[in-house]
Amino acid sequence: MIDRREARTRACELAEQMTTEEMASLLKYDSPAIKRLGIKAYNWWNEGIHGLARAGTATVFPVPVGLAATFDTELVRQVAGMIAVEARAKYNAYQQEGDAGIYKGLTIWGPNINLFRDPRWGRGHETYGEDPYLTGTMGVAFIKGLQGDDKCYLKTAACVKHLAVHSGPEELRHEINVEPTAKDLTESYLPAFERCITEGEAEGTMGGYNRLNGEPCCGSFFLITKLLRRKWGFAGYYVSDCFALRDFHEHHGITRDMTESAALALKAGCDVNCGNTYLYLLKALDKGLISEQEIKTACIRALTTRILLGCLDEVKTPWDNLPYTLVDCREHQQFNERAAQRSMVLLKNNGILPLKKKQLKTIGVVGPNADSRSVLLGNYHGTPGRHITMLEGIAEAAGEAIQVLYSNGCELWRDRTERLAAPSDRLSEALAVAKNSDVVILCVGLDESIEGEAHHISTGESAGGDKPDLLLPMVQRKLTEAVLSTGKPVVICLMAGSSMDISAYTEQSAAVLMTWYPGARGGKAAAKVLFGDVSPSGKLPITFYGPENRLPDFTDYSMKNRTYRYLEQEPLYPFGYGLTYGKVICRQAVFDRVRKVMTVEAENIGDMDTHEVIQIYCQNEDSQHASRHPFLCGYRSMLFPAGTCRNTEIMLSGDTFTVVDEQGVRQSGGMRYTLYVGTHGPDSLSRKLSGTGVLQVQINLTEKGDKL
């Protein structure tokens, strides 16, 4: 834990030497230099949720929802550590050139720990999925990787976003007033933030665009002061989302102008403004809307963060000499490839995978995402030194003895490839490829032009970045149906950042592999999974909904009939599910009530090494306030060599034996619980699809000896 006292003392000393105008100037995201005090110019805005973004070359890792699919906090911590190394290396180079521009600082605005409550939300792939516990633990790991473990300085400063209850619709984000129930707020929307502040010690917090119960999140006394600072003990800096403060008067209608909006935000505890509203702080001061002390308080917080980063004075941090050659270096590329392999989720396999080279003469690679670079990256991405598309990865893995035939088949959503051609101009080529291939790898899905942030260009298939539904774009549906109709074995590689309804194609397909947006080397990683160099091991961090699942209204933030915890119908594919090429079964589970630890013995009875995720779910048997279905309360990803048996201890979440009542109060959940231990959730669909069961451990906290 970094001792903030010395940094804060230094910040106070600097603030005492400043004029009010100088202090106010440091609260803008593009903070100017104050040369007489030796303070350099600094830009707070930098992005790095899965690799440094928007400032040139960087390692581009799988999108966060893909990283969440690994269920591996250590892997996520290492990814974040590499992002921090590249941030430092680039920062050092930029400083030598006197460049303090946007996307070049050490304050990384991530992770995004909003709950992926609705599969239509375009920014869902920036998050760690739909479960509060998984999101919180992944977020903590990412924060620790970004911030490092030095006792004096932060490697970089993580910033959790977007506080709070923010997840679409994108078109309404600047004006929507979200009113969750008190139970949903405490039970679902806030736990990840609390964990990331109290356990992860995130240095920064960013507010959302929306209002929460009438208060704009970037000007909410409840969120910023009462909850974040007083209850959770947050001591870092709070930053507005970009240009969110002008929404106060332009869209929310709770203030009249920029001056009042600046005053409201500052008084609520917003320290740094991403935007230009804080240009009006001095006017607000003149009008008596704020005090000089409030400006000074925010300035001290901002300066403290910069001092902890070692970028204010001429100090030496452990990372000052990191060379630029570490950016997208070979070590990071290789780890990136392993992360992508681990993120991929095998949803179906009739035995065709892994592909057997000796039995193949031709492989057809078809689809608009087969040779796409864009689909590798997701949003908020940097520029890889090299992209490896699906086509490139498969062709390289296939070798000289196997002919690889290719057709894009169609565009991502447009009805033709060539401007002067007729609609579906590449469909016949795709059919020719399929009919002349022993197996077809069909690469379909989305990219950031279809699902992303509100300012992304609408394609006609999406509105402001959100999906209108869960179906593939129409041209891809036609392509998929046509290729499947050939009767050739088809492996669908679904490339997207969210749940897709592919129920119409699952029965006819030979296998389905969810690759997400897998990062710069995603094509090579996927090829290694397809050809069996490694076993797939990812698990779904989100529910895949089917046609039977009627989604609530997008603007309804109630958790009723949302996510695996409250779903009312059987999904297409359940949370926590994913196949491997091995077969790991849990043999025994013993619960230690004192340490709240489950000891699990599991064995890989298959003939291939594989990573597997041991998952623990809890069902409260006493309380009327319990969730509808068992919820995730512990997990661990482990490597299981073929034929081996391993033991592991898994710590349960501290909230496992609690419930939240309708008033939003967390309390004891009673005495009786059932804990389920397995490689997936305890639902019947997971058991059916995987062919394996789960162990049940009955817990009565008034008794002793909880054992299967």
Image (spheres, rainbow, N blue to C red):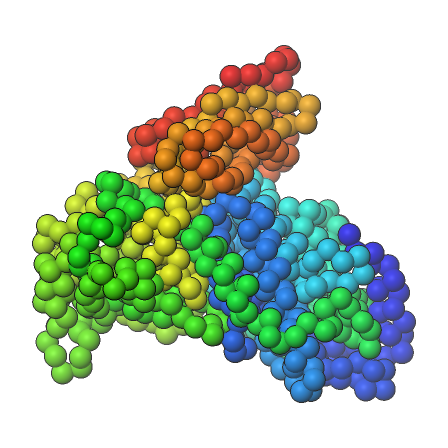
Residue 440 visible: yes
Name the quadrant containing residue 688. top left
Q: How far across and how far down the image is residue 672, in percent?
A: 56, 18
Residue occupying image coordinates x 47% and y 23%: 587
Q: How many marks?
A: 0
Return the residue nearer the eye: 371 or 644: 644
Instruction: Using residue 464 as the reference point, say whether residue 697 is left or right of it.
Output: right
Residue occupying image coordinates x 85% and y 74%: 15
Instruction: Using residue 393 as the reference point, say whether residue 292 is left or right of it.
Output: right
Name the quadrant containing residue 653. top right
Residue 207 visible: no
Vertical side of 342 occupied by 583: above or below: above
Vertical side of 401 occupied by 559: above or below: above
Return the residue nearer the eye: 361 or 269: 361
Q: How far across and how far down the image is residue 78, in percent?
A: 59, 55
Residue occupying image coordinates x 72% and y 73%: 321
Q: How far across and how far down the image is residue 523, in percent?
A: 36, 62
Return the residue nearer the eye: 78 or 203: 78
Residue occupying image coordinates x 73% and y 47%: 231
Return the residue nearer the eye: 614 or 397: 397
Q: How far across and how far down the image is residue 329, in percent?
A: 55, 69
Instruction: Using residue 539 as the reference point, say whether residue 495 is left or right of it.
Output: left
Instruction: Using residue 516 as the reference point, say whether residue 408 is left or right of it.
Output: left
Name the quadrant containing residue 155. bottom right
Vertical side of 23 occupied by 521: above or below: above
